[in-house]
Amino acid sequence: MPRVETTASQSRVISTRCCIVGGGPAGMLVGLLLARGGVTVTVLEKHADFLRDFRGDTVHPSTLEILQQIGLLDSFLALPHRREEQLLIRFGDGFHPVAEFCGLKPFGYMAFAPQWDFLDLLSDAARAHPNFTLRMSTEATGLLHDGARVVGVRAVDVQGELEVRSDIVIACDGRDSILRAASGLRVLDFGAPMDALWFRLPRSPTDIDNTFAVPGRGRLLAMINRTAYWQAALIVRKGSSTELRAQAMSEFHALVAPLLPFTDERIKHVAGWDQVKLLEVRVDRLQRWHRPGLLLIGDAAHAMSPAGGVGINLAIQDAVAAANVLGPALCNNVSIDEMLLARVQRRRWLPTVITQSVQRVLQRNLIAPALGAQPGPAAPMPRAARWVLQFPWVRRIPARFFGYGVRRERVVFGAVARTSEAVSNALAGFID
Ligand SMILES: Cc1cc2nc3c(=O)[nH]c(=O)nc-3n(C[C@H](O)[C@H](O)[C@H](O)COP(=O)(O)OP(=O)(O)OC[C@H]3O[C@@H](n4cnc5c(N)ncnc54)[C@H](O)[C@@H]3O)c2cc1C
């Protein structure tokens, strides 16, 4: 366990080797890997649990590979999840497969599981290590400095203010990162033409089984099958949700109902705006992902668009790269200089730039024109697209790109959990 002290002013001070802010996919995985390798880690998560709705449900084939490498795949597959071998789009003339995982190796499917289950799995595995601490309901509020170097974070929990002092802070606090704002690092903002409105619809046993999207004119709909219900996202023009929310629910029903492959009655279950959550879409990237003592990864370094559903994939791959690069130095009590932090950025920069570039092309050429059109039902699939997509190997191209990503990381640090004896020795070295 990390050291806890009280200063003369009675504010609590915690010392740890590595402080991770944010218990999303990036933060939980880098915390788990570092802890498995014997590093003393403290993760701060501002919420009391992982039970939030607006997180993607996708567990990509590349993430399944990572789980396999650290021996958690069977535990994941024992959780309630769904496997999609094809992703469908419902055009005006019916459902068409547009991405095909079937035939890809080593995993021929994309898994869908509520993200709270996935995060619980990672946190349970991490808590098995004595050198790992997860502090829920603890919100980082700023950075602590010693000259130009970041030496920890200020935070607040139910007992009040505390300081978490560490040799390195890894900011994984998502697209609204407080630490990113506090760091003063320069952000390149690429903009996004859309926002997402999230809501649930009941499922009937006779409904189609697949997760699918519907490209209506003036709005788009994504439907994720969560077995007991549909998790739906209505994608609307950026900024238009305020106008929409000022109107009666019947206007919202009229936008969604024509895109649903069931009777209009189902949408009436969304009876008030309190059942519809707005999630602002953003695409941006830090020019530099680090400062002395501070590294940012995942959405904190590069907020991803939901286009293609790849943000979790990148966050996970960043976490593996960060653990591989920083783990050995942290474990051997070597000081973490900026060159090491720059190595993490160098490793993850190209995959991020390529993925965001593809998302921006999709946003500019497909999503923005569709959202700008006069509202109407989905058009039939264009003939050229239908011809091209008849070939399974063509459908495997987007599946490979979005499912496996551009540069797959392999777990090196944390691949094998250090024995408790080795960890105790490392802890003793840290505490003395
Ligand atoms: C509408 C929408 C739909 C999406 N759908 C998908 C999808 O289907 N598939 C996909 O791969 N990606 C999707 N994404 C992108 C994906 O959600 C993110 O890219 C991914 O969650 C990033 O993971 P992360 O760990 O970096 O950050 P996050 O998942 O955002 O996690 C950040 C964590 O930090 C915590 N936190 C924040 N501030 C603090 C603080 N000050 N102190 C302590 N804790 C803090 C938060 O509570 C949170 O738990 C979608 C994005 C949007 C906008």
Image: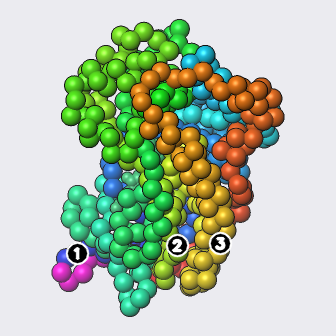
Amino acid at the residue labelled 3: Arg
Amino acid at the residue labelled 2: Gln
Mark 2 against mark 1, which lies toward the viewer?
A: 2
Ligand 1 closer than 8 Å to label 1 CB: no
Residue to which mark 3 is pinned: 346
Task: Kindly check if marks 2 and 1 are in contact, taking CB atoms under 8 A apart as contact.
Answer: no
C-alpha gap between disc 2 and disc 3: 11 Å
x, y percent for residue 161: 23, 68
Is residue 6 on the magenta stretch? Answer: yes
Q: Which mark is residue 11?
A: 1
**Element type where label 3 sits in the image:** helix
| Residue at point 31%, 39% (across, down) | 241
| Residue at point 78%, 41% (across, down) | 106
**On the picture, is 192 further left or further right than 386?**
left
Task: Kindly check if marks 2 and 3 are in contact, taking CB atoms under 8 A apart as contact.
Answer: no
**Element type where label 1 sits in the image:** loop
| Residue at point 19%, 76% (across, down) | 10
Of the image marks 3 and 1, the number of the one nearer the N terminus:
1
x, y percent for residue 358: 62, 51
Question: What range is drawn magenta here?
Answer: 4-9
Quadrant (top left, top right, bottom left, bottom right) of the N terminus: bottom left
Is residue 10 on the magenta stretch? Answer: no
Mark 3 against mark 1, which lies toward the viewer?
A: 3
Residue to which mark 2 is pinned: 287
